[in-house]
Amino acid sequence: MNANVTRSFKLTIAYDGTSFSGWQVQPNQPTIQGYLQDALKRLTGDQIQVIGSGRTDAGVHARGQVASCSLVWRDSPDHLLRALNTQLPESIVVCAAEEACEGFHAIRHAIGKRYRYQLKIGGVRDAFDYRYHWHLHSKLNLYQMRLAAQRLVGERDFKSFQATGADRKTTVRNVRACDLVVPSVTDANATYLSIEVEADGFLYNMVRNIVGTLVEVGRGKQTVKWIDHVLAARDRDVAGPTAPACGLFLLRVDYPDSVLKSHR
C-alpha cells in the first residue's frame, strides 16, 4: 500500500461519559473527541480531526457513537482499532474500525440514531447505578407513559423538546420508535426502566426532554393527551423538565451500506 495515501475510516466508539465534559473539544477540559485526536497524533505524528455523529453532553454515555476521520495508515482497520485502544483511557473504547468511502462524514451521512434512557424507580441509592440511571423514588404509571410515548411517534414538530442554544433550520423530526422497556433486572425494592427513542435526527436535549415529559405523565401530574398540547405549543416551557444526563446512552447510529468500502 502506498505510504502516502490518505484513507477514510468509520470508528464505532463506546464510552462512560461521567468524567468527561462531553464529546466536543474544549479548552482545558477532558473530552472524548480530544482524547481520540490526541491518540491519533501519537500514532501518526499528525493532527487528525475526528468528527462525531453528534456532540453528546457532559455526563452522557455511548455504546455506539460513530466518528469519521481521514489519515495516512498503512495497516488494516483492525490494527488501527488495536493501536487506538492502547492510547485511550479505559473509559473510552473503539469497538470497531472500518474503511469508509472517500469523504465519509459521520454527521452528513447518518440516516438515523437510537438512544436509550435508563431509570431506576424506588429502592435506595446505589453506589454504582447512580452513574447510569435517573433514580426516582415515587412509582410511575408505565401504562400511561406508553400511551403518551406513542403520541410522539411519527413526523412531528419537536420544537417544544429542543433546549435553547442550538437552533436548527427545522425542528421537524421523524420519530420511528419511542419504546418503554422493563429489563430483566432482579431487585425486590426497585424497578428498572429504559426509554428508547429512534429517529432520523435529534434536536439538542430532545431525548432528555422527552423523558422528563413522559415522567410527568407517569407521576400523574399530566394526562396522556397533554402530549398533543406540548407538541402543538412549540414552546420549550410547556414541556416537562430535562432528565439528568447520567441516564442517557447513544446506542447506535445508522448509515447506508454504501459508506463502507467493503460494500462497494
Image (cartoon, rainbow, N blue to C red):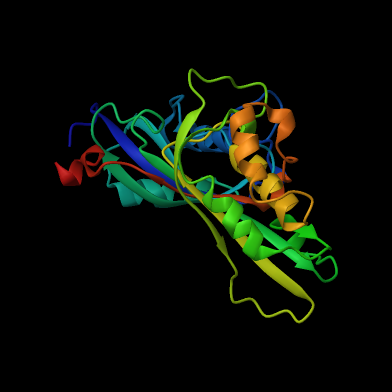
Q: Is residue 136 above or below residue 165?
A: below
On screen, residue 3 versus residue 50, left or right, reads left
| Residue 10 image point, x, y percent | 35, 40
Most foreground residue, 129 or 205: 205
Query: Looking at the rendering, in which quadrant would you find the C terminus?
Result: top left
Quadrant location of residue 107? top left
The residue depicted at 41 percent of the width and 38 percent of the height is: 200
| Residue 238 image point, x, y percent | 72, 32
| Residue 188 image point, x, y percent | 76, 82
Most foreground residue, 52 or 154: 154
Query: Residue 19, can we see it?
Result: yes
Furthest-left residue in view? 264
On screen, residue 182 versus residue 133, left or right, reads left
On screen, residue 51 versus residue 98, left or right, reads right
On screen, residue 59 versus residue 94, left or right, reads right
Query: Residue 208, can we see it?
Result: no
The residue depicted at 58 percent of the width and 57 percent of the height is: 147
Q: Is residue 164 above or below residue 216?
A: above
Q: Is residue 240 above or below residue 82?
A: above
Most foreground residue, 63 or 79: 63
Most foreground residue, 180 or 75: 180
